[in-house]
Image (tube, rainbow, N blue to C red):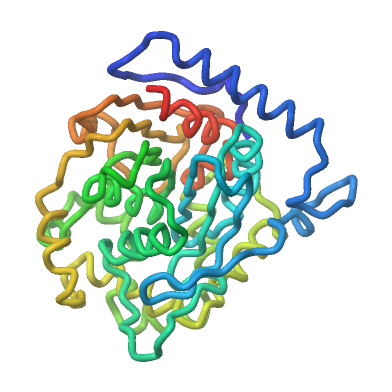
Amino acid sequence: MTSSKNVALLHGRNSDGHIDHGRRRLFGAAAALVAASVPWVSSASAQTSLTRSFGPLKRVNAGVLNIEYAELGAADAPVAILLHGWPYDIHAFLDVAPVLAQAGYRVIVPYLRGYGTTRFLSAATPRNGQQSVVAVDLIAMMDALSIRNAVVAGFDWGARTADIVAALWPKRCKALISVSGYLIGNQQAGKAPLPPSAELQWWYQYYFATERGRAGYEKYRREFSKLIWQLASPKWKFDDATFDRTAAALDNPDHVAIVIHNYRWRLGLAQGEAKYDELERRLAGAPVISVPTITLEGDANGAPHLEPPAYAAKFSGKYQHRLITGGIGHNLPQEAPDAFARAVLDAVAL
């Protein structure tokens, strides 16, 4: 894990001292967390990766899903929603969520469709993984919980979902924190060939395009996911218990179908649902995001990603990019929770 001093600010449109303010708030929250009893983990004095977890989870019917989620903080506090990616789960935010709760947020960390114990309400619902549908799930969850707006933060699929909510429903997004920046895509762009070195990074996307790939992921999803963790975060020395805790979320009965559909849809090899066509049309235009935004990147991210200058112009509001140093890979909130929490706290003050 990196400390606050390892956050490098690359560029921003406002530099009037908000960084110090955010640091004071984060340090105050961290001090409060240390001083207080911590009900969200086991009461044992020495926590291991195997025993540490969120407390009892909650459930809500939202849209086509029954979503399971962790919740910390006061019910009437401003909301921060934290979104995981593939092949990760809510435990990526295990060290972020309590800091935000201590800082005065109601923190909500949902299992995305196809993860954990989130389930479809009907067997007839397509197991769809296209980009817009995950954002629709989040808006449905916010509606079900009577959340008018929230700070939305995520990485990987979660960052893309947060980007989409900020772009299409800006009034619902108070601020955005997005690891690896602007991730909204479209099928036409996905069909364009890349240079060989870039194509190599997407090896699993092409594997998933085949029936052998679908069967292989079904049979070896844990081995496959551990390999992705290692490739995407080459300097992160996670232990087996940490991986196994998350790997349990990949045993969801809809997980493989949704992952395969997601990557095939990106290449135009699988159809989306017609009711989302208008949303995808808008996303294909690469809409500019106007809400206050902090983008983050780890200095050792082994997953495919663009360099910050390639997407900086997609954020038209108050904006800042931060490079997180110290060998931080793709799973930034779990590898550098202090830096991720700081970004959440600072984003609303941009």
Residue furthest top as drawn: 16
Between residue 63 and residue 115, name the one nearer to us. Answer: 63
Residue 197 visible to the viewer: no
Name the residue furthest bottom: 124
Q: Is residue 9 left or right of residue 105?
A: left
Give the answer, above or below, for where 122 lies relative to 24.
below
Residue located at (32% from left, 31% from top): 292
Q: Which percent across, then down, holds residue 271?
A: 18, 77
**Residue 156 vs residue 115: left or right?**
left
Tell me if residue 98 can be seen. yes
- Quadrant holding the N terminus: top right
Place of residue 175 in the rendered image (x, y in percent of width and height, measured from the top left): 37, 36
Residue in the image at 51% along x and 47% along y: 331
Give the answer, above or below, for where 298 lies relative to 256.
Answer: above
User: Total number of numbered labels?
Assistant: 0
The answer to which of 149 and 280 lies nearer the viewer is: 149
- The picture quadrant where one finds residue 137 is bottom left
Q: Is residue 256 above or below residue 97?
A: below
Residue at 82%, 41% (x, y): give it: 37
Q: Is residue 307 above or below residue 281?
A: above
Viewport quadrant of the C terminus: top left
Q: Horizontal and vertical percent for residue 303?
A: 40, 48
Which residue sits at x=45%, y=15%?
18
Q: Position of residue 296 (x, y in %)?
A: 41, 34
